């Protein structure tokens, strides 16, 4: 089915294309004049390169000195200011240990919803961000910073996390998940 205006469009199309091509051949004399003026200007001398500075060389002989490529935070005020306990931090996390399910969740997304006592041991009930309730006990790991459950009471779960100080060391940080969060 042909539209009634098809003949009109076919007739006007070459005229429109011709009008567009006329715009491409517009007066470029101002551009050509600018280029010729720039080419006519005399070139300036290129500045010589600056002479390189000569540095004294130094040969490092370690001997009994510490390596300049390792940060030594042991016993310094810098270690204490970074949250350490006056030493270089604690040993890093045990990478050979199998990770537990609740280590995939940030601590602030976990909520203590109760406790249960079984065979003389107190377990905590923890709800994750997906709404699933898990039973945990002292010694289990939770959170994304290698948090180990230290103790459980009726109102909170005490956790000791290993947090990187950004310099290759780990610092123990105590935190808790309360039942009123």
Image (spheres, helix red, strand yellow):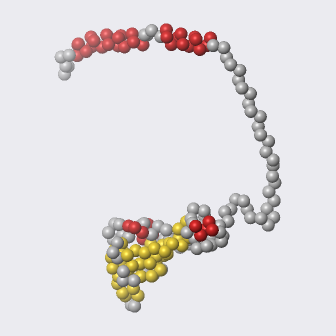
Q: Is residue 131 above or below residue 139?
A: above
Closer to the camera in the image, 82 or 108: 82
Closer to the camera in the image, 98 or 134: 134
Q: Is residue 67 above or below residue 17?
A: below
Give left or right: position of 35 versus 109.
right
Q: Quadrant of the C terminus?
A: bottom left
Q: Quadrant of the N terminus?
A: top left
Closer to the camera in the image, 70 or 129: 70
Q: Give coordinates of residue 115: x percent, y percent.
A: 35, 82
Q: Give coordinates of residue 3: x percent, y percent.
A: 19, 19
Identify the residue at horizontal 47%, vertical 80% (top origin).
Answer: 150
Give left or right: position of 85 versus 139.
right
Identify the residue at horizontal 49%, vertical 8% (top origin).
Answer: 29
Identify the residue at horizontal 40%, vertical 74% (top origin).
Answer: 177
Q: Is residue 176 visible?
A: yes
Give left or right: position of 110 versus 6.
right
Name, please, the residue furthest toward the bottom: 120
Identify the residue at horizontal 65%, vertical 69% (top origin).
Answer: 76
Q: Give coordinates of residue 160: x percent, y percent.
A: 49, 75
Closer to the camera in the image, 70 or 143: 70
């Amino acid at each position: 089915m042909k539209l009634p205006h098809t003949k009109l469009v076919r007739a006007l199309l070459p005229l429109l294309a011709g009008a567009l091509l006329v715009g491409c051949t517009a007066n470029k004399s101002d551009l050509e004049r600018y280029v010729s003026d720039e080419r006519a200007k005399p070139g300036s001398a290129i500045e010589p390169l600056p002479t390189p500075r000569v540095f004294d060389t130094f040969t490092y002989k370690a001997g009994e000195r510490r390596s300049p490529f390792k940060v030594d935070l042991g016993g310094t005020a810098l270690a204490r200011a970074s949250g350490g306990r006056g030493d270089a931090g604690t040993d890093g996390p045990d990478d050979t240990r199998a990770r537990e399910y609740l280590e995939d969740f940030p601590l602030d997304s976990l909520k203590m919803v109760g406790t249960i006592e079984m065979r003389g041991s107190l377990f905590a009930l923890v709800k994750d961000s997906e709404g699933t309730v898990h039973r945990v006990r002292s010694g289990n790991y939770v959170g994304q910073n290698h948090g180990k459950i230290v103790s459980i009471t009726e109102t909170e779960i005490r956790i000791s996390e290993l947090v990187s100080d950004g310099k290759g060391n780990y610092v123990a940080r105590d935190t808790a998940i309360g039942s009123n969060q």
